[in-house]
Image (cartoon, helix red, strand yellow):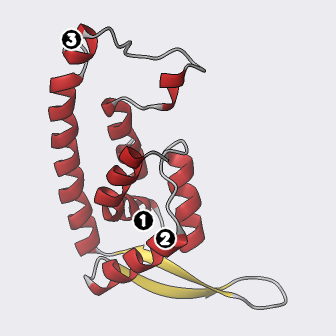
């Protein structure tokens, strides 16, 4: 993960987690895997980042926690996280802010703008060095997908 990826993740981690939970209740490790999968391996959050964030979201009333026993002989218990109405409202607000930001960036550097002026292809060739980078529109799509909107 690049420094830019880390900065985007750090600034939007709560929105991403709330977006995941808007789709269904999840336990911690499941959120980490789902975030990585839906972002096409762009966002790889560590458990040491996730659990303090979940605790903070719980304190703010954005999520609630419940325990569920797993099958098997050990009778393990998993903590599941559920988004509340307040959490859904916070997610909707953060998502709207993100969409405005993404549109603004696209307007400055997107198709027909600076990117075209310097010869940047809108779709890099698969396997090329630039292929690992997402366009702002694709990055916004990741956020919308995480939120269950796409």
The Cα atoms of the two marked residues, 2 and 3, are separated by 41 Å
Give the side of residue 36 with respect to residue 17, left or right.
Answer: right
Name which quarter of the figure residue 17 lies in: bottom left
Q: Secondary structure at mark 3?
A: loop
Q: Which residue is mark 3?
A: 112
Q: Based on the displayed image, in which of its 4 quarters is residue 86 positioned? A: bottom left
Mark 3–mark 1 Cα distance, whole angstroms, equals: 36 Å
The answer to whether the residues at label 3 and label 1 have Cβ atoms under 8 Å apart is no
Q: Secondary structure at mark 2?
A: loop
Q: Report helix, strand or loop for mark 1.
A: helix
**Residue of label 1:** 21
Q: Residues within 10 Å of mark 3 (few under 14, many from 20)?
A: few
Q: Position of residue 115 (x, y in %)?
A: 27, 16
Query: Would you place residue 55 above or below residue 26 in this image?
Result: below
Residue 149 seen in the current view? no
Q: Which marked residue is nearer to the observer: mark 3 or mark 1?
A: 3
3 or 1: tag closer to the N-terminus: 1
Q: Residue at x 15, y 25 (%)?
A: 108
Nearer to me, 122 or 63: 122
* Quadrant assignment for the C terminus: top left
- The residue at 21%/65% (across/down) is 89
Location of residue 14 in the rendering, given as x and y in whole percent from the top left corner: 33, 65
Q: Are marks 1 and 2 in contact (CB under 8 Å)?
A: yes
What label does residue 25 carry, if any? 2
């Amino acid at each position: 993960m690049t420094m830019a990826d880390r900065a985007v993740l750090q600034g939007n981690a709560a929105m991403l987690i709330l977006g995941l939970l808007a789709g269904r209740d999840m336990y911690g490790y499941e959120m980490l895997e789902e975030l990585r999968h839906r972002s096409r391996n762009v966002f790889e959050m560590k458990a040491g980042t996730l659990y303090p964030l979940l605790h903070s979201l719980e304190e703010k009333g954005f999520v609630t926690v419940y325990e569920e026993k797993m099958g098997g002989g050990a009778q393990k218990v998993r903590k599941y996280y559920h988004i509340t109405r307040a959490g859904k409202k916070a997610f909707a607000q953060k998502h709207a802010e993100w969409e405005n930001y993404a549109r603004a960036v696209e307007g400055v550097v997107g198709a027909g703008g600076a990117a075209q002026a310097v010869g940047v292809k809108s779709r890099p060739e698969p396997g090329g060095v630039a292929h690992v980078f997402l366009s702002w529109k694709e990055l916004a799509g990741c956020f919308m997908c995480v939120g269950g909107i796409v």
